[in-house]
Image (cartoon, rainbow, N blue to C red):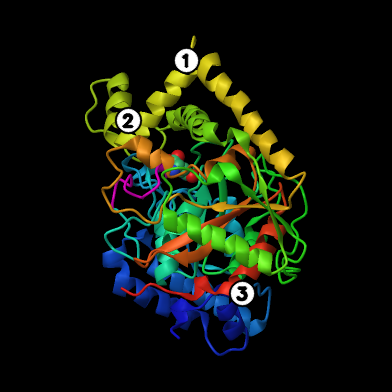
Amino acid sequence: MKPYSLTIHEAHRLLKDGELSPEELTRSVLERIDEVEERIKAFVTIDREGALKAAREAGERLKRDEGVTPLTGIPISIKDIFCTKGMETTCSSRILRGFVPPYDATVVKRLKEAGAVIVGKNNMDEFAMGSSTENSAFQITRNPWDLERVPGGSSGGSAAAVAIGESLASIGTDTGGSIRQPAALCGVVGLKPTYGRVSRYGMIAFASSLDQAGPITRDVEDAAILLGIIAGHDPLDSTSIDEPVPDYLEGIGRGVKGLKIGIPKEYFIEGMDKEVEEAVREAAKTLEKEGAVVEEVSLPHTEYAVATYYLVATAEASSNLARYDGVKYGYRVEDPENLLDMYCRTRDKGFGAEVKRRIMLGTYALSAGYYEAYYGKACQVRTLIKRDFEEAFGKVDIILTPTSPTPAFKVGEKIDDPLKMYLSDVFTIPCNLAGLPGLALPCGFTRGGLPIGMQFIGRALDEATILRAAYHYQSVTGWHLLKPSL
Ligand code: GLN
């Protein structure tokens, strides 16, 4: 087995026993990048020297056995939405080209303190708006299972990199599904934690009341390990929750006996791929066989989730993106006639079509005369969606759903039809609106060989239970062990 294809916990064992050095592991990952990146295009920045330097430092740390964590010497990648001190951070947008942050996002700081080796920054949909990475201003990432297909998005670079061995794990962000949907389409594990569980400081804002960072990994243990490191209170983020972080690995192996799992009847909709539906129903049966109690639940306001999300998210985005004016960061047009011309042309040239569409939609939803009818109404429906979950969690411990209604689609298939693209988030969006944790994991393959993902949704701050159910499912099925070959 090549070092680049190890999980974090496997690599950690070898590093601790001295059977592998962080430098060897990092070189293996960098060689893998050399081998496949031209075809996959998962990175916008690769930091070979920085990675090797961090690997050598991690090696010293391991030798002295000082402050060693499960991440010490582990090569990971980071979605290009997180500020990285001294390393360009673009959100895959022209408007941030050349922006080199003077500080690290809290997530990045915690990873570095734990001794992780950061190999580079992953491609994404511009400002995390999209479900395919086709909205990146720089390149389209390809799905390692089929190069003609998208890896999902917006954290598509992250999911593709992890699936093909260009990093052992990545950190993505999820506003309406951007960790879980690409994880599903690439056959890896993706965890969106409870809103507020992980600090948003230094994570470039899309929709602040929905955005959350989380791990994309090759298995469930690795997700538990990474979450344990990035989670926790941060005084620099006023929405971060001040609750102790549990040991997510403790009790992960306790099985699913007696666990109550709800299947929402509204999540098996018309237009959904038959093979996806079959795989998720089959997974429910497997869990039942393992001792879980599976029952139907109802989330009656699900049908309004996509519309609600695209009002709340665009409203917040229009406000958050007002700061890109050519003055403070990155790109500015040359030879402006005056200040207004500079603002207008910088934003016109700097933003891509989808970002502009969102800014316009959001500005409209917030404008005087329409605010109550659109943004105000969306906030009310959001509360109803949240209540649906509260009701369901009165009866069950976790909820099982498909992650995405279809497996990976072809590059170009949906890009000219925004509504079609928006619909790929139908199962992931409710979780964000309600602030709940959701975990996507592989649950089978289509006859054409594309991975299928399912999703566990948990109670607020109860990541431990969805991790436990996912871990058990993974151990009895082994879908996560299948790897793409190029
Ligand atoms: N695909 C959704 C969107 O385009 C979700 C994106 C995300 O979670 N960042 O808004």
Residue hosting label 2: 347
Amino acid beneath label 1: Ser
Residue hosting label 3: 475
Say what secondary structure mark 3 lies in.
Answer: helix
Decide which of tag 3 and tag 1 comes sooner along the chain.
1
Mark nearest the camera among 1 and 2 is: 1
Percent position of residue 340, x then y:
31, 19
Percent position of residue 61, x then y:
61, 78
Residue hosting label 1: 367
Decide which of tag 3 and tag 2 comes sooner along the chain.
2
Amino acid beneath label 2: Arg
Boundaries of the magenta span:
127-139
Percent position of residue 157, x then y:
39, 57
Question: Which residue does the image show at 59% across and 70% down from the upper left?
Answer: 474
Q: Quadrant of the C terminus?
A: bottom left
253 or 88, which is in the foreground? 253
Mark nearest the camera among 3 and 2 is: 3
